Amino acid sequence: MVAEDFKRAQERATAGQLALELMHEIKNPLEALGHLVYLTKEEAPDVDVVRRYMVQAEEQLALIQQIAAQTLGLARPSTIPTPIDLVTLAEAALRIHQRTIAAKQIRLVKDLPTELPVKVLTSEMLQVISNLIVNALDALPADGTLHLRMRRCDGRVHLTIADNGCGIPDEHVNTIFQPFFTTKSEGNGLGLALSRDIVHRHQGSIRMRSSVRPGRTGTAFRVSIPA
């Protein structure tokens, strides 16, 4: 019963997180659409200007559809591993959080191959990457740096997500993957526990190294799965 209760708690927490992410991410394009509608009314006699505003409105609508599809896709259950380009999956996860990256003026450093095909449960692996990006963004100050690195080696794919944020103290290193453990004022402490379980179901591993030394703070998570 305890395991079943934990599973339900995971599902509720994930659904709640996705709903909040979705509402946050679509706020700006919705506001842009409102401005474009107003400007279109004001410039109604000028056909060329109206056409330009409508093109911009279409772009905002496409962005909303993209955000919704990607965010809700994290909760869509996958039962059969399918071939997918892991680079494309990582780029999709980044786009979900692009506005947070822009708002904090995060420097994004990508060291990714052109493509890296793997066979995974797509929605679950997207959730892992998204969770690790969220953790990094939460730890980063304004103007911080977020690194994404991906390699294939010895029959495995290795994805590293690193930041130069505040780091994780030694006393928390052995508990960060425990369910409901969190050092944040907000959050449910399930993100890393969920990510670890998903990676293990893919016969993979997830490891963390961190530093809180002044001038060298930061954290790196490395996910390794069979290629």
Image: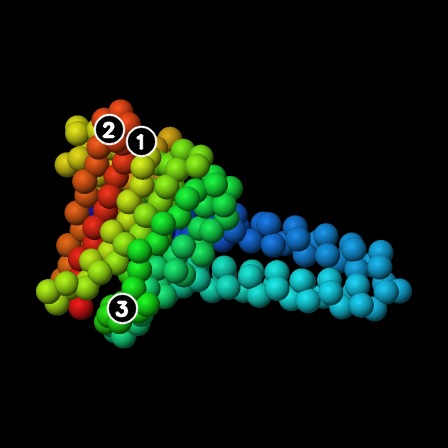
- Residue at 66% of width from left, 53% of height from top? 32
- In the image, 139 versus 1, the foreground residue is 139
Q: On the picture, is 45 further left or further right than 3?
A: right
- Residue at 41% of width from left, 55% of height from top? 94
Q: Secondary structure at mark 3?
A: loop
Using the rendered view, name the quadrant where residue 204 is placed: bottom left
- In the image, 204 versus 162, the foreground residue is 162
Q: Position of residue 5 (x, y in %)?
A: 25, 49
Q: Could you tell me if the residues under marks 2 and 1 are in contact, i.e. CB atoms within 8 Å?
A: yes
Say if 160 sits above or below 184 in the image.
below
- The residue singled out by tag 1 in the image is 166
Q: On the picture, is 94 further left or further right than 24?
A: left
Residue type, numbered disc 3: Leu
Using the rendered view, name the quadrant where residue 58 is placed: bottom right
Q: Position of residue 62 (x, y in %)?
A: 57, 65
Q: Secondary structure at mark 2?
A: loop
Q: Position of residue 216 (x, y in %)?
A: 26, 31
Mark 2: give few (<14), some (14-19) or many (20+) Cα within 10 Å: some
- The residue singled out by tag 3 in the image is 116
Say if 157 sits above or below 149 in the image.
below
Mark 3: give few (<14), some (14-19) or many (20+) Cα within 10 Å: some
- Residue at 28% of width from left, 27% of height from top? 215
Using the rendered view, name the quadrant where residue 115 is placed: bottom left
Q: On the picture, is 119 further left or further right than 101?
A: left
Residue 13 seen in render: no
Residue type, numbered disc 2: Val
Kindly give the residue lying farthest to the left in the view shown: 154
Mark 1: give few (<14), some (14-19) or many (20+) Cα within 10 Å: many
- Residue 212: assigned label: 2
- Give the distance between the C-alpha atoms of the residues marked 3 and 2, in whole angstroms: 33 Å
Earlier residue among tags 2 and 1: 1
Residue type, numbered disc 1: Cys
